[in-house]
Image (cartoon, rainbow, N blue to C red):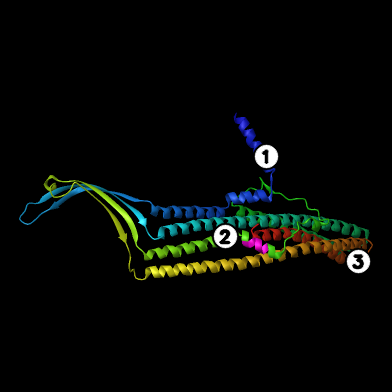
Amino acid sequence: MKLKILLALMISSSLYAQKSLSVDELIKIALQNSPDIKLSKLDVDISKEHIRMAKGYYLPYINLTAQGGKEWSKLKHQPRGDIDILSGSIGASQLIYDFGKTQNNISGYIQEELASKAYMYQKISDKILQVKQAYYEILKAKEILKVQEKNLKLQQNQLYRAKKYLKAGIRTIIDVSDAKVRVQMAKQSLNNAKYNIEILYTKLENILGINLSKKRYDIYKPKLDITHISTRLPKLHQSLINLEKFAYKHRHIIKSYSHLIQKAKAKVSAIDGEYYPDISLQANHNISHIDKSMITSLPQEQSHISINMKWDIFNGFQTDAKKQEAKLNLLKAHMQKQNIHLAIKEEVTNAYIALKQSFDNVKLNEKILKSTQEKYNQAQKRYINGLNDFIELQNAQQDYINSLSQLANSYYDYFIAMALLDHAIGR
């Protein structure tokens, strides 16, 4: 039995080791484990308790008290008297009417809960964007790593060729020395690319909120074919105006501030109720164990029921100050929502422009790559035939490598720009 369990664990571990995580799987991990998402959920839970607390004012207050002991007293020219004390009481009070204070407080906390939920959904949207950005940055870094591996291979081939030409007496020793330097520089660039991937993985794990051993997982990387790469990019078919309208309707941060405005309005109405009295019903019942010497002068049981009214006619202008503060908070909430509208408009516009720019960059870098590749091929032929020097060949090769890197950068920058736009409009 133990052998079967161990075998099952080994198989499951082996399967997990082979798993490449897609962006959707990474998002799921982040939403389950990220501390800031959990914190926003706790804020929602706290706001629910605020509602329970506010609703409690509609329920009766019941209290139970008890006391036991001994009392000594002495009157002049009288012997000292000892009295045993043992008594208990139960009381209850019930709010009847408070001119909307409790109801408006409840309404305000309900809006607070809705605002907290909207804010939580906004944090989820922010987290999705962070995961997408980190994911595409890793894909970009992996593609740059491939470019640097290709660069090293080209430099090593060039060193081999320079040595052959030197041995044949076609080229000088300076070509070999220069080629050796270029090989070392290519190794350094490759090494830096590897370290950059390590840094990006660490950043991703921080976003996910969990430490995933890289021996057990990898990031899924679709195969990238640079041939006509711009034609395979997802296109944007909506206008900027429609995107802005979509954002105003779907961004959770706007919904959050809309609920905060309603909460502020409810607070003003609740404070209005403080200008009027609270009316409540109160009842008490007392039971006492009476000492024999006092049985004729103190009651063994006593009850009362009454309707009470508490009205703070003047409290040093505290209610006026609280109402003014609530009105200012309401005005502040309106202005904050206006600022959010302006910020979202700018965010959507910038993301829209960045997406168009990224698309144009991909198309331009395609053309640049084609030109630099042709130039490099021509430079190789000229070098073989002795028509140019090593520097011209290296410049053409470096232009080719740079164009490969630029195309990879611009390609994944397009997907990052698309993620930024989706986040900006709340999609």
Dot 1: few (<14), some (14–19), or many (≥20) neighbours within 10 Å?
few
Mark 1 — residue? 14
Mark closest to the chain's N terminus, 3 or 2: 2
Q: Quadrant of the N terminus?
A: top right
Q: Nearer the viewer, mark 1 or mark 3?
A: 1
Mark 1 vs mark 2, CA separation in Å: 45 Å
Mark closest to the chain's N terminus, 1 or 2: 1
**In screen coordinates, is 63 left or right of 202?**
left
Q: Amino acid under label 1? A: Ser
Mark 3 vs mark 2, CA separation in Å: 66 Å
Q: Secondary structure at mark 3?
A: loop
Query: Of residues 369 and 385, which is closer to you in this image?
Result: 369
Task: Using the rendered view, name the quadrant where residue 229 is placed.
Answer: bottom right
Location of residue 3 in the rendering, given as x and y in whole percent from the top left corner: 62, 30
Is residue 66 visible in this depiction of the protein?
Answer: no
Q: Amino acid under label 3? A: Asn
For the record, the magenta segment spans 243-248
